[in-house]
Amino acid sequence: MIEIDEVSATLGGTRVLDRVSARIAPGRVTALVGPNGAGKSTLLAVIGRLLKPSSGTVRLDGREISAIPSPDLARRLAILRQATQIAPRLTLRDLVGFGRYPHSGGRLGDADRAIVETCLAELDLAPFADRHLDSVSGGQRQRALIAMTLAQTPGVLLLDEPLNNLDLGHVRRTMDVLAARARAGTAVVVVLHDLTVAARFADDLVALKAGRLFASGPPEDVLTADTLSALYETDIAVHDVAGTRVVMA
């Protein structure tokens, strides 16, 4: 369980999170949604201990996250940010293997290599595993970064807009993989802009606006025309089509 209590954060002298509180449960996919500049990426960075809050606390399984030793946290929590610098001459397999570093210390054993191959296959990358990052498409690089994060096998998985550059088929495949990790007990937190994808795959939503919590709950409670129109300050229609909620601006 991740407990976020009255968290505020400041960047460049500007408060970008203002007393946000939320609970993120294991075994569920939680989507962070909201307009640009709402504070979604900042909240993810605070949860991942990449940014220290100016006030408030984040606890992981009852323990303040700031007190967890870094090696222990790296085995329990993995985060994929939007901007990730990677060496272009790495192969996809090498990159995914870096996800095992908290467990292997850089010396992959048979079990580590098996996890790497599983993650490559899950993200439809096995045929490209020996290709270098500068010789594959943007979508393939993005999937390799997701696979690297999955290879860390954490109890908490944080992903900031992981669907960037992915085609429709790989959007579905990636979200299916994340949902499967959640069903296996992982707490999956993902920043999403596609609200129809959020409706289909998320168990819970946390909606932010101007750094504050705007709404939270299951998709059927948050993804309504009235709530979304107020959140994004534009008219938004919501329809149920073949059992799936579809959001249209």
Image: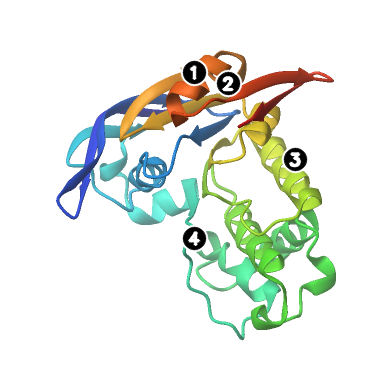
CA separation in Å, label 1 and label 2: 7 Å
The crowding category of the residue bearing disc 2, from other C-alpha atoms within 10 Å (few below 14, some 14 to 19, many at least 20), is many
Report the quarter where the N terminus lies: top left
On the image, numbered disc 2 is attached to which residue?
223
Give the position of the C terminus as an image quadrant.
top right
Q: Nearer the viewer, mark 4 or mark 2?
A: 2
Along the polypeptide, which appears first: circle 1 or circle 3? 3
Q: Which residue is mark 1?
A: 227
Q: Tell me the quarter of the picture where residue 209 sits.
A: top left
Q: Earlier in the sequence, mark 1 or mark 4?
A: 4
Q: Is residue 157 above or below residue 87?
A: above
For disc 4, the marked residue is: 102
**Circle 4: residue type:** Pro
Give coordinates of residue 50: x percent, y percent. 33, 53
192 is higher (above) or lower (below) than 99: above
User: Callout 3, which amino acid?
Assistant: Asp
